[in-house]
Amino acid sequence: MNTSPTPPQRPVEKVALLLELMCDPTTAWTTEEVWCRIESWVEDRIVPVLLTHLQSDDPSFVRLVLNVFEVEAEIKGEQTLTEHIDTFLTMLQHEDLLVRQAAVDLFGVLSVADGKVISELRQIISTDDPYLATQAAVTILKLKHDEADRLLPFLIVMLHQDKPMIKLVVLDCVDSLGKRAEKLLPHIFTQLEKGFVDSDAALAILKITGDDAHAWRVVGKWRQEEEEDEPKIIQQAADELEEEIKRIMSNRSHSLGIGPPIFPRTNHNSSNSP
């Protein structure tokens, strides 16, 4: 029997194994954990090392790689990624929907308003899944604010879709619309009575107008509700909504020169799906 010790793995081999083990299923913190480990192993070689894994036959594997690139851009800057735009563009045409979604998310943080990027995102709006098409429209808004007038009619149609997840994408983009978000207001008000998105509609109204009454009304409604099985869950949601209201109001005050801003706690949830 061979009792010799297993030779230590090279960093590149460890990266491949880690991606394979962590790509499915993922949790809310998978992407950050994977990025931290890979960065500690290969340091400034993280981009070329990860690029070698984009051609995997496993969509879950590719999706995680794109998610890690997104973290890399947010933490260390996009400068080491922008030269690989053409490679990332091919991911927008991937046969797997969730890979295309991860590529759209990546372009949302790369801030590259390249004509080819905008063209590919427009193609997704025209031909792809409605949820992903809505995400692509919001990404274009992040990259080119002057596209707001062109995209606003599409966003209004999407806001009135039956699927709550599509509504949420639209309601979350009002910051990117700037003053043009006011044109969405009549349509946002119709969402206040839609149970799943009422809080997001109220927050969107707050961001656009500074009126927090609708958001506090949702908080009050939630605090009066009870969950038989998990009584603390809805109260925790009310606490989180209250914190978000205060953050938005603080940041609005800061924009007017009154007091410091409050920044939100964020995480990268790579398990989101349409």
Image: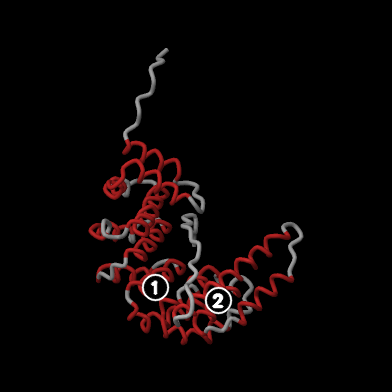
Q: Nearer the viewer, residue 107 or 161?
A: 107
Please tell me which residue lies in front, 40 or 132: 40
Q: Residues within 10 Å of mark 1 (few under 14, many from 20)?
A: many
Q: What residue sits 33% from the left and 72% below the top? A: 143
Tag shown at residue 86: none
Query: Where's residue 27, x and y in %?
Result: 51, 51
- Which numbered disc flags the more N-terminal residue, 1 or 2? 1
Amino acid type at mark 2: Leu
Residue 82 horizontal side relative to residue 271, left or right: left
Q: Which residue is mark 2?
A: 203
Label 2: few (<14), some (14–19) or many (≥20) C-alpha neighbours in 10 Å: many
On screen, residue 250 versus residue 241, left or right, reads left
Count of marks placed on residues: 2
Q: Quadrant of residue 113?
A: bottom left
Q: Provide residue 238's location: percent of width, then percent of height.
A: 65, 68
**Residue at the location (66% across, 73% down)?**
219
Q: Which residue appears farthest toward the front when viewing the image?
A: 259
Residue drawn where x is 37% and y is 63% of the image = 104
Front disc: 1 or 2? 2
Q: Which color scheme does this rendered protein use?
A: secondary structure
Q: Amino acid at mark 1?
A: Ala
Label disc, if present, on residue 137 of the rendered structure:
1
In this view, 37 is above or below 100: above
